[in-house]
């Protein structure tokens, strides 16, 4: 290996190493990496030449690192997961399918660690397919309005969700909404596809947990009975005597309080910044099971000018969604 140029000072060396990491981890071209690291393409080329790191000009005109196939396995799998063919992915990474077919990833088994090829030939069509799927850990939030007797929206109805702010709240009325947060939701899906798959099951879970009459609270039922409209509604719906309450009714002490369960009125978001957390999972382990359970924290939010109040006051209610990656 050729020694570093004596003319390259410590600050410049540090910038070049930052650029090298960007090219390796984020697959940036030389020009883009040099710009991010606040150095020049010329300086970066000299650095690579001095330390013996190979770069190659890509078809787009950009220079990229020439890495050994072993270091390209995850980049190769990500490109194929995003829709590239094996040939296209290999070309983009300045390697060949022939080299990548021999790369393996470790898998824990009852017999110990085994190593499996990252790609294989499909039984039909004989095209190359991946043996692994990326299972990411996502931060997911779902929220919507609460409705009362007569399906009237509760609260001021001007803002809701994680971005609601006290300084924009009405001075006389609270903004009210329900919200559930899943901080580690595992899935092979991304963004809109994850939302499309899991919004409805999450809402159905919440309805079962929070809107099933199962709680005895005679004092609250008696209080409801002192309101003529509530009493008439309960009687008309067959809720007579010391009827059971739902979790939401008992929590908020409001008769017939329920979620607006129209899916087009419910918001769901995925924090993409956490999609980088996760692991490569052998596909046959997913198809042969892939069971997952994600813990959600449910709260009802009251945003007033004076700040946010949450219920239950003792802390969020835990709900758990059970699902299978095999169905994705």
Image: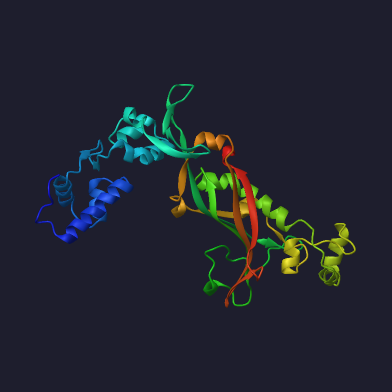
Q: Is residue 63 above or below residue 100?
A: below
Q: Which quarter of the figure is the N terminus placed in?
A: top left
The C terminus - image quarter: top right
- Of 94 and 17, nearer the camera is 17
Q: Residue furthest left?
A: 7
Residue lying at the far front of the rendered structure: 111
User: Residue 230 location, x and y as percent?
Assistant: 83, 66
| Occupied quadrant, residue 12 | bottom left
Image-based side of 303 in relation to 3, left or right = right
Q: Residue at x 23, y 47 (%)?
A: 30
Q: Position of residue 248 (x, y in %)?
A: 72, 63
Residue lying at 89% horizontally and 61% vertically, measured from the top left: 240
Q: Is residue 120 above or below residue 248?
A: above
Image label count: 0
Q: Is residue 268 left or right of residue 150?
A: left
- What x and y, as percent, mark residue 126? 44, 22
Mark yes or no: residue 156 visible: no
Q: Residue at x 53, y 70 (%)?
A: 165
Q: Which of these two is toward me, 203 or 318?
A: 318
Q: Position of residue 205 (x, y in %)?
A: 68, 51
Residue at (54% x, 67% y) in the render: 164
Relative placement, left or right, of 145 versus 268 is right
């Amino acid at each position: 290996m050729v020694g570093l140029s004596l003319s390259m000072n410590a600050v410049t060396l540090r910038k070049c190493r930052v650029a090298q990491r960007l090219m390796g981890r984020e697959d940036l071209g030389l020009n883009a990496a040099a710009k991010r690291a606040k150095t020049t393409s010329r300086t970066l080329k000299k650095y690579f030449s001095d330390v013996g790191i190979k770069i190659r000009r890509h078809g787009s005109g950009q220079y990229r690192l020439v890495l050994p196939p072993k270091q390209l396995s995850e980049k190769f799998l990500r490109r194929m997961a995003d829709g590239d063919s094996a040939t296209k992915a290999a070309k983009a990474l300045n390697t060949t399918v022939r080299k990548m077919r021999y790369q393996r990833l470790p898998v824990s088994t009852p017999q110990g660690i085994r190593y499996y090829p990252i790609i294989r030939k499909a039984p039909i069509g004989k095209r190359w397919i991946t043996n692994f799927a990326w299972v990411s850990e996502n931060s997911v939030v779902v929220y919507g309005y609460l409705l009362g007797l007569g399906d009237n929206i509760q609260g001021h109805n001007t803002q809701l969700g994680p971005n609601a702010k006290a300084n924009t709240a009405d001075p006389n009325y609270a903004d009210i909404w329900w919200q559930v947060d899943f901080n580690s939701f595992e899935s092979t899906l991304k963004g809109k596809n994850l939302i499309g798959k899991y919004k409805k099951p999450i809402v159905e879970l919440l309805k079962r947990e929070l809107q099933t009459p199962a709680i005895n609270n005679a004092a609250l039922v008696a209080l409801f009975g002192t309101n003529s409209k509530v009493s008439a509604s309960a009687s008309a719906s067959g809720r007579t005597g010391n009827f059971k309450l739902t979790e939401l009714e008992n929590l908020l002490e409001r008769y017939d309080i329920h979620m607006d369960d129209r899916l087009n009125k419910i918001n769901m978001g995925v924090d993409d910044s956490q999609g980088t957390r996760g692991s490569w999972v052998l596909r046959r382990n997913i198809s042969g099971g892939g069971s997952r359970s994600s813990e959600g924290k449910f709260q009802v939010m009251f945003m007033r000018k004076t700040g946010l109040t949450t219920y239950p006051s003792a802390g969020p209610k835990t709900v758990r969604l059970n699902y299978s990656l095999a169905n994705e």
